[in-house]
Amino acid sequence: MNFKILLCAIFSTLLFACSDASEQLNADYGSAQSRDRLLPAEHPLATTFRDEVFPIIEQRCVVCHGCYDAPCQLKLSSPEGIDRGASPAKVYHGTRILAADPTRLFLDAKTTEEWRKKGFSAVLNERDQTADANLDGSLLYQLLEQKQNNPLPQAGRLPEQFDFKLNRETQCVNENTLADYQQEYPLFGMPYGLPPLTADEFISIKNWVAQGAPMSKPEPLSTTLADLLIHWETKFNQTSVKAQLINRYLYEHLFLAHLYFSDVTTPASQPTRFFRLVRSTTPPGQPIDEIATRRPYEDPKGPFFYRLRLVSSTILEKTHMPYALNEKREKRWNALFFEQYFNVDTLPDYSSSNPFIVYEAIPSHLRYQFLLDEAFFTISGFIKGPVCRGSIALNVINDKFWVFFAKPGFTNSAVAEQFLRRQALNLSLPSEASSQSFSVTDWLGYAKRNTKYVQAKSQLVDRYMDYQKGLNLDEVWSGNENAALTVFRHFDSATVLKGSLGKQPKTAWIIDYPVLERIHYLLVAGFDVFGNIGHQVTTRLYMDFLRIESEMNFVSLLPNEDRKPVMASWYLDSTQELSSYLNDHSLLYARPTGIKYQTAFAKTELMSILKRHAYSSEQQNRSTLRYNIPPKDLPLKRLNSLENSIVQQLPEISYLLIESEKQGDRVYSLLRNNAHKNIASLLNEGEQRLPHLDTAEIYPGIIGSYPSLIFRVAERDKRDFINRFLRATNSDKFDQLIARYVVRRSNPQFWFVSDKLHQIHRQNTGVDYGLLDYNRLQNR
């Protein structure tokens, strides 16, 4: 047979086989078309969905299918996400040559039919709406039923065929590949790699799907919330040129926030209503038509209005950044911006995204104070935004470091304002460029301009500082509980908490206004998760400059003779180019310290000084109360001093659930801190590791979004658990510890424990609560 004919025959056979399932469904139930499943909130079926069905989906499905990296982009955290369905296209694809079209739920398509045109396939039946058709044509139901018919082994590790790697090749099943998938992978029903739904839960989902999967529109807002919405939308849409510039600045910094009205008392039985600040083509009082741009500072291409759009999705720990709107906030913004005397002659267009150019009319110390007021939120944008996924995005920071902030005082001067204006071009960011571009020449230009800025900054301080007094604590902000932060990196995710927590880290940052603003515009407002490799690499490389500058600010408070050794210890085996940059005399020695040290261990002493300085004794006590182990669990402190051989067995995040009828259930987080020679290398992080220096720390409560192990210990077994842990110095002994105390993926009690963890988490965190993500759970 002719080879071409053979190929055509094979292709035709495959095409026929692949289309057979769709054709059969079409023959049985008619052709597919998108359906309107959203019912008014008061409809009985909508009530059933909210009260009975969606809680099951949240607690059993959204814990894996909720975030940016949900498998197959199947986000089940809202009716719109369920109806949108799945796509095999990857969101996180760090090596893509060309930028991808964005697929942000609620934004890049307005209807289910538009999502179909973007390559998303249904997981609910879109043919005749009969019970049989709804069940036969629903991938969601078919995969849940598959798990019911083929449950996992109820003990031990799952078989090797289960792949839980972060960048695994996911099986994005559609109706044409479902039969082969179920035959080849019978244990791969949903929830994937976890126990099945209970019989009652499965029946609830089955009945709902059989009815056509009716879902609910959001419940109406209370009169109080509706009035506040009008008030704040009026505030955001003031028409003066000055107010328009201020509100543009607010929007570009709050676009990821979950805004809520904290002056409104919400009944315990009802969830807090959160809102997003968006740009809409429609004015207040009309349905919102959100304008889709890749970045918040891009041209909206026409008239628009700022609107507060209700968040109708499940609140996730990974993406939840609550930000209160209240009377106190309004007075603060009025004092900072609206009532301040400064002129805005013309409104800048959208040709530039450089905040130091666009917002030069707003005094920089006011902008900085706005960021400082909620510095925890500002830094959370980097930690919880879409940039924060995968090692390339996060290997720019150490596994644990403390953050402090420069006081706004010095920038409140004509000299500082003139300096920032002159340096605006040197403060340009690579994120201003297209999501498609990467040019070595352009990158070298950004690096050169950054170096010019840092040198000019040193000369400015050198010229105007008091040499008799020197740099001292007067330069460090201590305004509120945001004045000190702790950042933990968990390899491919991260967490930020208020306070200088735990053991002293290796490094610390002191962030000033130009650094803080650039962090936001580089990693939050300017980062495009759908961008190409060039965009992501330049973003990562530029962040090196911001980290080093912040570390230099800290080192500048040390005695001159300590500075070079400290920086050298942070950047072991660094390249010659980096060493030259770090040892630049104008950067490292330009500013003498005014702190009188009492010991020979200046860095350790400085960290203690800053910790006391940033927080008042009352704030320190509150932080200690929240993050110190209480007396009833003091033996757990021994886990803060684990032998390194034990630390080597640990994943990034482990949760410890202690159950006690008398003393109450409580949960702890055991974090692993990985040590590095330096973190200035883009691609070979493994070669920079110093595993023999890794440490671990334990804290009360839930820290992080992605647990890797969950330990479950009865109060009576606590001592045995600790003793076994302290003896788990090799993989065999740690496996024994896991076998006895870890709630494995195969454990029939997994969902019971999961529900308990979330219940405790909700009680402890209130408005900060969000659902965890189990995509990083290990199979051990």
Image (cartoon, rainbow, N blue to C red):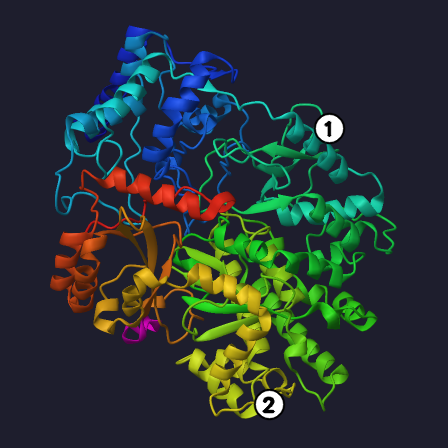
Q: Quadrant of residue 143?
A: top left
Which residue: 26% across, 62% down?
650
Left or right of residue 25, residue 289 in this image: right
Give the answer, above or below, for where 232 lies relative to 744: above
Identify which residue is drawn at 73% across, 28% down.
283
* Alpha carbons under labels 2 and 1: distance apart: 59 Å
Q: Is residue 25 magenta?
A: no
Q: Which residue is mark 2?
A: 596
500 sits left or right of 675 in the view: right
Q: Which amino acid lies under the numbered mark 2 shown in the image of this protein? A: Lys
Task: Pick whichever, 71 or 761, lies toward us.
Answer: 761
Locate residue 715 relative to residue 772 in the image: left or right: left
Say which element carries label 1: loop
Q: Which residues are magenta?
A: 687-694
Does residue 297 appear in the picture of this structure? no
Total number of numbered discs in the rendering = 2
Pointer 1: residues within 10 angstroms few (<14), some, or many (20+)? some
Query: Foreground: 396 or 406?
Result: 406
On residue 283, the disc is 1
Residue 745 occupies which quadrant of the picture?
A: top left
334 sits to left or right of 536: right
How crowded pointer 2 is (Cα within 10 Å; few <14, some 14-19, many 20+) is rated as: few
